[in-house]
Image (cartoon, rainbow, N blue to C red):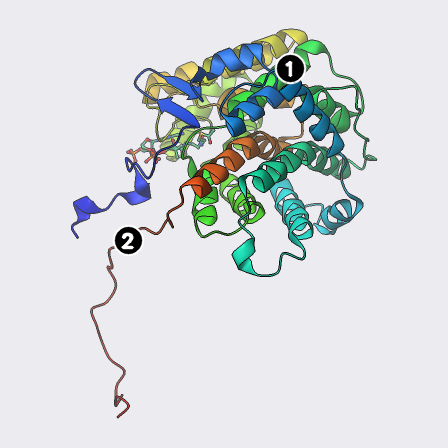
Amino acid sequence: MTDTDIKKGLAGVVADTTAISKVNPETNSLLYRGYPVQELASTQSFEAVAYLLWNGDLPDETQLAQLRATERAYRHLPAEVRAAIDLVPLDAHPMDEVRTALSLIGAKDLAGTGSVLDVSGSTEENLARSVRLFAVLPAIVAYGQRRRRGQQPVEPRDDLDYAANFLWMTFGEESDAVVVDAFNRSMILYAEHSFNASTFTARVIASTLSDLYSAVVGAVGALKGPLHGGANEAVLHIFDEIGSAENVGPWLDEALAQKRKIMGFGHRVYKRGDSRVPTMKAALDTLVEHYDRPDVAALYDTLESEFVGRKGIYPNLDYPSGPAYNLIGFDTLTFTPLFVAARVTGWTAHIMEQLGSNALIRPLSAYNGPDERHIDGYVPDA
Ligand code: ACO
């Protein structure tokens, strides 16, 4: 094997087919099951998009009502999951809470399964598990943020749809329609993005015929890193460091001199801009107007134009979503758990697709360690 055969980071490698989403960097487009994501974000609820990702088509009224009824039934945080979250130190990262909570939910659901031969599940079982995780994640994320703020948990409201209820459980008050709409759009934009690092992690785990919960827990771990999902949180740290639009120039001079990566910019696949950014930027604009925060827009625009002008590297989805979540009132540490709540739909769709035509994912490596050598005095067994 030569160095040129090695695809470091699997860059450019087509690992399998997928019918779930199509990322086209040439046309700067992203399709979920054939639909442009910006059309879905403008017209659909997150519940309908989850249905689309799992089932291949948008739901009719009855199908959507059924999904919403099931989602409402699983919105409550089980007491033992709440207790498990409480065992996670308050100063641990909330992604560790999410990982722990999902792991316990999986263990409880699969209790009694017995042999590992039986854990991968049928499509029907995995669809039910997917809906359950999608339904309970808002309670996990909201509980975590409230716990860190020393606030009591807020019970879900059956009269509210997914996005409005998520905000209700987090803030304990009903959000304005414009805020619910921006949040719903962000969930749709974050839901799915082909073989990104966390989704591929989920598929690798599923390919061993492990269970859906284990695959999702592994994906949470992959998403936590700042080169992937952790970047939405990192964008806000950068905004806090810079402070205001006037400081962008000197801050960028120093950051680039130190060869720092500017979080929220760049993408492995998109090199001329992330297809999701214009839709999320429009949602951010509505929030800027709603909360009357032109300073946020000024900082956003100035950093974008200065960085793109100097490096030719464009913003990714995390760049507009970070400040949007901040304006809505989410703590910075809650941003990546929000990404989990959205992406669990894509992960679980991919797990089911992987299991539908499975091949164990097991690449090769090129050894570059020491040549064969031997222990002094070693005598082979006769
Ligand atoms: N800031 C500064 N320089 C950058 C950035 C950035 N955000 N992104 C890329 N570059 C530079 C690299 O330093 C490198 O320069 P060099 O060739 O002089 O060494 C060159 O561009 C290529 O970058 P790589 O990191 O090798 O490209 P890759 O395709 O592996 O990176 C990645 C993609 C990891 C997303 C990268 O752009 C990055 O680290 N961005 C910041 C983190 C981030 O925003 N992640 C979110 C991803 S999208 C999502 O999860 C929704």
Of 127 and 15, the residue lying toward us = 127
Q: Residue at x 35, y 34 (%)?
A: 17
The reply, left or right, for residue 321 in relation to residue 105 is left
For the residues labelled 1 and 2, the Cα–Cα distance comes to 47 Å
In the rendered structure, which amino acid carries the disc numbered 2?
Leu
Position in image of residue 71 (x %, y %): 69, 29
Residue 297 visible in the shown view: no
For marks 1 and 2, the one nearer the N-term is 1
The kind of secondary structure element at disc 1 is helix
In the rendered structure, which amino acid carries the disc numbered 1?
Glu
Position in image of residue 204 (x %, y %): 43, 47
Q: Which residue is mark 2?
A: 364
Position in image of residue 55 (x %, y %): 52, 27
Q: Residue at x 78, y 17 (%)?
A: 174
Which residue is farthest right?
Answer: 152
Residue density around tag 2, few if under 14, some if 14–19, many if 20 or more, within 10 Å = few
**Height in image: 196 above or below 318?**
below
The answer to which quarter of the image holds residue 373 is bottom left
Of 185 and 257, the residue lying toward us = 185
Q: Which residue is mark 1?
A: 61
Residue density around tag 1, few if under 14, some if 14–19, many if 20 or more, within 10 Å = few
**Height in image: 14 above or below 2?**
above
Q: Residue at x 70, y 10 (%)?
A: 177
Q: Residue at x 18, y 48 (%)?
A: 3
The reply, left or right, for residue 64 in relation to residue 311 is right
Position in image of residue 139 (x %, y %): 72, 34
Q: Where does ligand 1 appear, by image quarter?
A: top left
The reply, left or right, for residue 230 in relation to residue 161 is left
